[in-house]
Image (cartoon, rainbow, N blue to C red):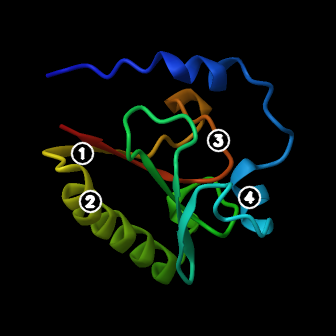
Amino acid sequence: MERIWAPWRIEYIRKKKSDGCILCEILKQDEDISNYILYRDVENAIILNSYPYNPGHLVIFPYKHIANLKNLTEKERNEHFALVSRSTKVLRQAFNSEGFNIGINLGKVAGAGIDGHVHTHIVPRR
């Protein structure tokens, strides 16, 4: 298996983090293009990761600021994972992706950079 090497992510790692939730902050702004918001559904949004592991690295997150999947309603959860599924289809076509890393880091100890707002990463692999 080929490892992902993304040295450009060091800027994100060293960057001073805001006190608020970056996902909630960008949703409030009317700047979808500059915030890389690709799609807003009823309960969730899809953005391009600003510090991607690979080109096409997407993040899907609910509008509701919650830290755990168990706090999503059934409607929010179903839409969330339907968007994960649809995103893999789109990325497969757009990037000719052969596979994907799909992950949710629940809690800081699990590696969540934004631990207060649950989100799913989709990283296309070639």
For the residue carrying disc 4, how many other residues have a C-alpha within 10 Å: few (<14), some (14-19), or many (20+)?
A: some
- Helix, strand or loop at label 1? It is strand
Which quadrant of the figure contains the C terminus? top left
For the residue carrying disc 1, how many other residues have a C-alpha within 10 Å: few (<14), some (14-19), or many (20+)?
A: some
Q: Are marks 1 and 2 in contact (CB under 8 Å)?
A: yes
Compare residues 72 and 61 and report the one nearer the observer.
Answer: 61
CA–CA distance between discs 3 and 1? 21 Å
Q: Position of residue 69 (x, y in %)?
A: 51, 60
Which amino acid does the dot numbered 4 rest on? Ile
CA–CA distance between discs 4 and 3? 13 Å
Q: Are marks 4 and 1 in contact (CB under 8 Å)?
A: no
Provide the residue designation for mark 4. Answer: 26
Q: Earlier in the sequence, mark 4 or mark 1?
A: 4
Q: Are marks 3 and 1 in contact (CB under 8 Å)?
A: no
Q: Position of residue 60 (x, y in %)?
A: 49, 59
107 sits left or right of 101 in the view: right
Q: Position of residue 19 (x, y in %)?
A: 86, 40
For the residue carrying disc 3, how many other residues have a C-alpha within 10 Å: few (<14), some (14-19), or many (20+)?
A: some
83 sits left or right of 111 in the view: left
Q: Earlier in the sequence, mark 4 or mark 2?
A: 4
- Residue 88 numbered tag: 2
For the residue carrying disc 2, how many other residues have a C-alpha within 10 Å: few (<14), some (14-19), or many (20+)?
A: some
- The correct choice, above or below, for 48 with respect to 110 in the image is below
Provide the residue designation for mark 1. Answer: 100
Q: Position of residue 38 (x, y in %)?
A: 52, 65
- Helix, strand or loop at label 4? It is helix
Provide the residue designation for mark 3. Answer: 114
